[in-house]
């Protein structure tokens, strides 16, 4: 029971870390110092995520599910105030721009580095874990 609670708490923490990273990536155009810190945070958090789950099936399903859920939730969080306070056309244009930034970062930088750190974390959990 304690292990399940620990997993749920860490999955929620990983979810909020990803929202933080993707929210910053929604407005960044070039590579800067904040993006480097976001990459380091994502590598470390994915490594810890991999050490928590000892089976590769659960780790990959949780990782992919959280990744896409946070990407779409971040787009929705940014889109909603624009849609309410300005107009739906402006929200559509902002959604296209933000989705381009988030998915470009996600597929070219975040996913390859996270897969490597996820499998390293799984390796550590199997051989040095509980």
Image (spheres, helix red, strand yellow):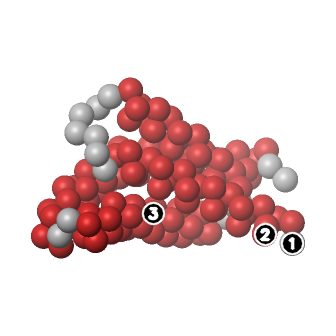
Going from the N terminus, do you reach mark 3 or mark 1 first?
1
Q: Mark 3 highlights which residue?
A: 70
Q: Do the CB atoms of the residues marked 3 and 2 lie less than 8 Å apart?
A: no
For mark 3, give the secondary structure.
Answer: helix
Dot 1, crowdedness within 10 Å: few (<14), some or many (≥20)?
A: few
Gap between marks 3 and 2, in whole Å? Answer: 21 Å
Q: Is residue 6 visible?
A: yes
Going from the N terminus, do you reach mark 3 or mark 2 first?
2
Q: Do the CB atoms of the residues marked 1 and 2 lie less than 8 Å apart?
A: yes
Q: Mark 2 highlights which residue?
A: 4
Q: Mark 1 highlights which residue?
A: 1
Q: Residue at left 46%, top 32%?
A: 37
Q: Do the CB atoms of the residues marked 3 and 1 lie less than 8 Å apart?
A: no
Q: Residue at left 38%, top 64%?
A: 77
- Position of residue 65 relative to residue 53, above or below, is below
For mark 1, give the secondary structure.
Answer: loop
Q: How many marks?
A: 3
Q: Residue at left 45%, top 38%?
A: 39
- Position of residue 26 relative to residue 29, above or below, is below
């Amino acid at each position: 029971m304690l292990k399940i609670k620990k997993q749920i708490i860490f999955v929620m923490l990983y979810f909020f870390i990803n929202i933080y990273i993707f929210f910053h990536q929604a407005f960044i155009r070039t590579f800067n110092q904040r993006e480097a810190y976001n990459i380091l945070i994502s590598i470390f958090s994915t490594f810890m995520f991999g050490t928590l789950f000892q089976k590769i099936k659960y780790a990959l399903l949780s990782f992919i599910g959280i990744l896409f859920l946070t990407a779409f939730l971040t787009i929705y969080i940014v889109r909603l105030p624009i849609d309410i306070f300005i107009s739906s056309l402006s929200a559509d244009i902002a959604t296209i721009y933000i989705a381009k930034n988030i998915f470009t970062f996600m597929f070219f930088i975040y996913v390859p580095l996270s897969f490597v750190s996820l499998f390293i974390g799984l390796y550590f959990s199997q051989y040095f874990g509980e």
